[in-house]
Amino acid sequence: MRCLDCGARAYWDEFTACPDGPIAEPAMTTPNRPLFDALIDGVPADAIPVADRGLQYGDGLFETIAVVNGDPCLWGRHLARLRAGCARLAIPPPPDDQLTTEALRLTRGIDRAVLKVIVTRGDGGRGYRPAVTPKPRRILGLGPWPSHPDAWATQGVRVRYCRTRLSHQPLLAGLKHLNRLEQVLARAEWDDPAVPEGLMLDSDGLVVEGTQSNVFAVAGGRLLTPLLDQCGVAGVVRDLVLAQARALGLAVVEAALEPALIEAADALFLTSSLIGIWPVRELAGVSFDPDRVPPTLRAAVLAAAIRP
């Protein structure tokens, strides 16, 4: 691990381990392994029963986790969010040690990959009513690292607004549940490889998040991010950014953010487990300076994001 004084770029290099330009596919580097490995309830498999409630109703949760040098990054934070989500949905969570053992079975010896952990309520009959004593199903799958130009992490990305709005449901706000149709519809709105992300508004016209990321604004010396009390996903890197910002003495505000406030900010950046931090250089024709993202915050977040 290199020192913080080396700056954010050093940590980004370690996080992505890629040269300038697109990452060569596939990024799972162990020879003679399939492009996608999976364990279902601890057994190698590639199919689930048609009665699974995750398939039937989206009744479950998932985590998307970066794998670096064989380790699932931010694993403790992902487990904590999964446990909290299971508690809110009344799904008995798998034991942490069981998930850890199964995750390491898939990631051991892998340089770079994406680990997805899904927990469903398990099988059920017709109708929405869940079983009193469900038998949850756990699905762990390993896929290739995404191909993103390295320049997006240093020079910033172009972002657009999505037409699809997020509906309000406080009972699900913050959860990474399996119902992702709003994000699917939003991401289907454009097919421009130079625009990797779109910001989603809620039914009140407030900025909530990206289709697959959280959003932050730097304005007047403060770090702003949307309050996720009505909708949206509380990402693990979002929580990491908030914790690191407070540790660095930065003023942090979680609030309702209108597009006009976002567009007037000094800087914008996006976060997720797979991208770390992407500065925004343009949003709907408004330009931003990627260098205005606080470098100490960026370095601290990227340093923490590549740890198990």
Image: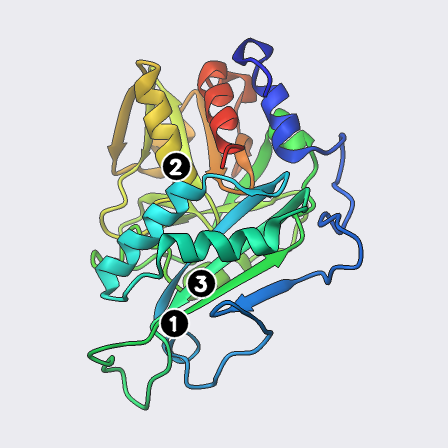
Quadrant for the N terminus in the image: top right
- Residue at 78% of width from left, 44% of height from top? 24
Q: How many marks?
A: 3
- Residue at 73% of width from left, 63% of height from top? 34
Q: What residue would you read off at disc 1? A: 58
Please provide percent x and percent y for residue 217: 39, 28
10 Å neighbourhood of mark 1: few (<14), some, or many (≥20)?
some
Question: Which amino acid type is shown beneath numbered disc 1?
Answer: Gly
Q: Secondary structure at mark 2?
A: helix
Q: Nearer the viewer, mark 1 or mark 3?
A: 3
10 Å neighbourhood of mark 3: few (<14), some, or many (≥20)?
many
Q: Nearer the viewer, mark 2 or mark 3?
A: 3
Please provide percent x and percent y for residue 152: 63, 33
- Residue at 49% of width from left, 54% of height from top? 101
Question: Which amino acid type is shown beneath numbered disc 3?
Answer: Ile
Tell me if label 1 and label 2 are in contact, CB under 8 Å. Answer: no
Q: Could you tell which of marks 1 and 3 lies nearer the N-terminus?
A: 1
Please provide percent x and percent y for residue 206: 31, 44
Q: Left or right: where does residue 235 sit relative to residue 141? A: left
Q: Is residue 98 above or below residue 234?
A: below
Q: Which mark is residue 118?
A: 3
Q: Secondary structure at mark 1?
A: loop
Q: Left or right: where does residue 145 sit relative to residue 250? A: right
Q: Which mark is residue 238?
A: 2
Q: Could you tell which of marks 2 and 3 lies nearer the N-terminus?
A: 3
Distance CA(mark 2)–CA(mark 3): 20 Å
